[in-house]
Image (cartoon, rainbow, N blue to C red):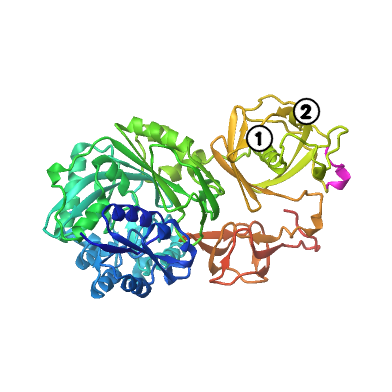
Amino acid sequence: MIKSVLIANRGEIACRILRTAHRLGIRTVVVYSEADAFSLAVQMANEAYAIGPPPVSESYLNIPKILEAARQANVEAIHPGYGFLSENEAFAKSCHQAGFLFIGPSLEALQKMGSKSEAKAIARKAGVPVIPGYEGNQENLAAQADRLGYPLMIKAIMGGGGKGMRHVKTKADFQKSFEACQREALASFGKEDVLLEKYIPTPRHIEVQIFGDTYGNLVHLFERDCSLQRRHQKVMEEAPSSLPKGLKEKLYKAALKLGQVIHYVGAGTVEFLVDQEGQFYFMEMNTRLQVEHPVTEAITGLDLVEWQFRVASGERLPLSQKEITSHGHAFELRLYAEDPHHNFKPVSGQVWVKKVPEAVRFETGLHPQDKIAPYYDPLLAKLILKGENRHETLQKAKLALENLEILGLKTNASFLKRLLSEKAFLENNIDGGYIDRYLNRLIPPQIIPENVYIMASLIKVLSETQHPLSPWDEEHKWRLEGYAPRSFDWVCEGEVKTIFLTYSPQGWIYNPWIASPPMEARNDVPQSTSSLRGSIATEPIQKKTLNAYLSNNTLFFPPFHIPFWESEEKLSLIYEGETYVLISHAPLWVSSHKKKSESHLKAPMTGKVVLILVKEEESVKENQPLLILEAMKMEHMITSPRKGRVKHIFYEIGDIVEEGEDVMDISEEETAHGFAKKR
């Protein structure tokens, strides 16, 4: 058995490999960027070596620095995990030349299957159906796209995970999609070449796990259904699939045939698209461990990372095909740091994983309290659930999401809950385009319940005093006559709200009809006339006594318990299963002249400016593309909120911009008479 290994990766997969390595008694070494200096993987490993700044091109894709760390640590082997350099032939070759075992397939297999274009050619020769497309000269892509016809797919030749991939509906969209794919491919995998594929509507995305050793043994470990995707990134996976047994056998046979042709060694995944008529097409092969490998582990009872170590150590496969069995049903739910209500934009910042559901395999690279950096994939964690059948596993998944408490930033947890309740999902009748087709239903318009603001205000006032239900502290200068109200000003999702609470001997009182500061001093802010809504009361009321207390970062307000966290200027809480992030805000009627002009366009996320599409003094139209931010390895287009003129651009290409910072000053166009048009 290998005695020492360097893990050339980060986050969840690094921690996953570390756990198995420690169980096998293997000395572990990790490399880390400056952004990951205090990460969980660094603390779990026996040794850790810094390899550069946060950008992946300067750290996790920097082959010389990784090899230098391996030499310093004097390890036998290097495990690439998934993503980054895991399918990079040059990296594997460099490892071998430097005297390290590369835990993965042979160089020949990497070269043949690491490139989607060559993999398709091999599949065609092997008689495996392949999606029609073009994998040739990059300068001829536009003409080949016209030949194939639209819609079509553009895909990066290297890598996966939805990076460098676009669905192009019309010829007019081709060039900008092609250029975006090239940029993402280069940033994520170090190579910008792409290929074209005919678009197949409503397919299922089915993949077969295979495993080979150096003695010529090759087995499959059944299949996974990975059809639920958005932005071509998987959201949820399950095993086994609902395909007919005969079709499954054909997929196993095709996957093993490809593996045998290239004498495959190690863990590999052969991916297929299956159309509504049951015809399947080879799509690509991932010559590495997959993100979703835990669902296969759940139904087989095997540790695929252990198999990787054993095969790399020269051992035979632990089991033959006949000895590998499947039992039960498994789901993997991917928890992302992203905001579904804003086009799944990635979010970064402080996060607190306050509560993890029991009896759930929870794979993460996070400390309970950690910081999400904007440089990497937004995957926070994976929840893996196993049951005797699909229905039982589904109930466990719903319960797990109900009991998961993550504070500090938005996640896709509530979106996953809605997916689990979809009729089509319950009937196992979904496909690769399902989420995109029904996005409006899966992400209904966001209405922030007034209770969110009331609970936040109650948390604030109960946190401020040593005796939370005693308003008599001298330092707070409470007025005994009439019990003067306290005001709390909040911003949540761009909405500004003021809440007034009054103390009485019975407890704090919320009264939506309470007199607020004089209108003439409030700079046109209307007096609140809203009522307490949600589960506390369904009818309009004039006041409500709020008898509550705080314990263990939870507001107990029968029948509710509201987990919360105050971090820096933010207060986040979970109300009715949804995480809300609120910011304390100075009242609108105070110092309003200090507010920045609304003409300033702010960055919706932290990211790197990769392209600026306009110049200063240029006139722009509403929704016109202005610049592209790269955040968490994906590109995001920023458009103009209105017709206007670019007065100033605050950043240059290559700069990092923080969320909420001004990126452009877009002044409103003037009319012929010189008056600014109203928005």
Which mark, residue 429? none
Left or right side of 653 for 545: right
Residue 267 image-quadrant placement: bottom left
Residue annotated with mark 1? 451
Residue 77 is situated, as x and y percent measured from the top left of the image, at 26, 65
Is residue 636 a member of the stretch shown in magenta? no
Residue in the picture at 38% in, 73% down: 65
Residue in the picture at 64% in, 27% down: 536
Question: At numbered mark 1, what does the secondary structure look like: helix, strand or loop?
Answer: helix
Residue 519 image-quadrant placement: top right
Q: Quadrant of the N terminus?
A: bottom left
Say above or below: 195 vs 389. Answer: below
Q: Residue furthest top?
A: 539
Which mark, residue 505? 2
**Residue type highlighted by circle 2:** Pro
> Magenta segment range?
516-522
**Residue type highlighted by circle 1:** Asn
Q: Nearer the viewer, residue 53 or 41?
A: 41
